[in-house]
Image (cartoon, rainbow, N blue to C red):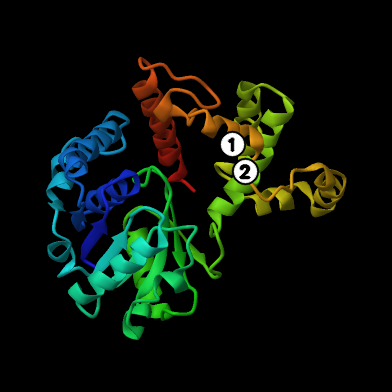
Amino acid sequence: MIQKISVLGAGTMGHGIALNFALYGYKVNLYEKVESVRKSVMDKIEAGLVLLVEEEYIKKDKINETLSNITLHSNLHDSVRDADYVVEATPENMELKQNLFEEIDRYCPKHTIFATNTSSLPLKEMMSKLSEERRERTMVCHWYNPAYILPIVELSFFGNMSEELFNEVYELHVNSGKKPVKVLKDIPGLIANRMLHALAREIFTLIEMEAASPEDIDTALKFGPGFRSATTGMLEVADMGGLDIWCTVQDNLFSTLNNSDKACDFMRKKVNEGKLGLKTGEGFFKYSDEIKKQAQKDFYKRLITQLKTSKTY
């Protein structure tokens, strides 16, 4: 049974993963080698919990209880030596992840399950420096950001792991308030990101074509396809509408859709200009210093509202 969890990396994804497991009563070791990140991460986790209280998703007494479940570490060995389950949330660099897995393979008990939060790097290559025994206990566990709010976790079942062990990890995430997706093929982007970026490719093309303003394009998504997608999957929507109708529409439409194999020039121009979104003050929209923090908070609040509603589905 999985009881002791280690999260490696306390950045954007790692701190949210640690928060989520701790919120549901698991003891979590959170490892971070960068001192400045280590010094600020518990305040960041507490701020996330405070927001959940403000939005009436959890009770106030859950804040201290959750924080007490997290132990911060600067030493990798100490953070994993008695772990049942280790999930790494380090930058998307294959060599970095290979070496990290190789190192903790020496520190962890034989029963420890290894997980990577990647969605773009192949698991087989990532496991190349692990023992055969450990490869049978290694998988992808891909969370969405913010990890403590978005319900989805994609779990790999690529043939290297027994179904019994997979089911143990699956139940861990169910017991942590998640909606796991069992992924059967080791493909770039897994499931959710492939769907997301297929949609994003067309949206960025519409911007490039000046087919509508950024505000109206987002409105079309939020109150059209996105409105249904919050509660109803695409396959169910197609069944409801009639596959004959969908087939006809796709025959008429697909030849006009973007099929490029790289990011659009318009977005690349934004990146080259340093207009990266909220973190730089401008992306598709502008964010003054006065509204930056509030914009992110409002974004999270909308997601928490959806999270509360999704409990009925």
SS label for mark 2: loop
Left or right of 200, for residue 104: left
The answer to whether residue 117 is above or below residue 279 is: below
Instruction: Pick whichever of labels 1 and 2 is earlier in the sequence.
Output: 2
Q: Residue at x 41, y 69 (%)?
A: 126
Q: Nearer the viewer, residue 119 or 146?
A: 119
Q: Where residue 14 appears, x then y in whole percent? A: 30, 50
Element type at mark 1: helix
Q: Say above or below: 10 vs 114.
A: above
State the image coordinates of residue 202 (x, y, percent, origin top left): 69, 40
Q: Are marks 1 and 2 in contact (CB under 8 Å)?
A: yes
Q: Residue at x 13, y 41 (%)?
A: 64
Q: Which quadrant does the N terminus fall into?
A: bottom left
* Residue, disc 2: 263
Distance (Cα) linking label 1 and label 2: 7 Å
Q: Quadrant of residue 296?
A: top left
Residue at 36%, 17% (x, y): give it: 289
Q: Amino acid at mark 1?
A: Arg
Q: Residue furthest bottom?
A: 132
Q: Position of residue 2 (x, y in %)?
A: 25, 69
Q: Which residue is mark 1?
A: 268
Q: Nearer the viewer, residue 259 or 219?
A: 259
Question: Quadrant location of residue 58?
Answer: top left
**What amino acid type should be assigned to the residue bearing mark 2?**
Ala
Q: Horizontally, is 286 left or right of 12 in the view? A: right
Q: Residues within 10 Å of mark 2 (few under 14, many from 20)?
A: few
Left or right: residue 258 compared with residue 190: right
195 vs 8, nearest the viewer: 8
Packing grade of label 1 (10 A; few <14, some 14-19, many >=20) is some
| Residue found at the far front of this picture | 272
**Can residue 171 be seen?**
no
Q: Residue at x 86, y 50 (%)?
A: 251
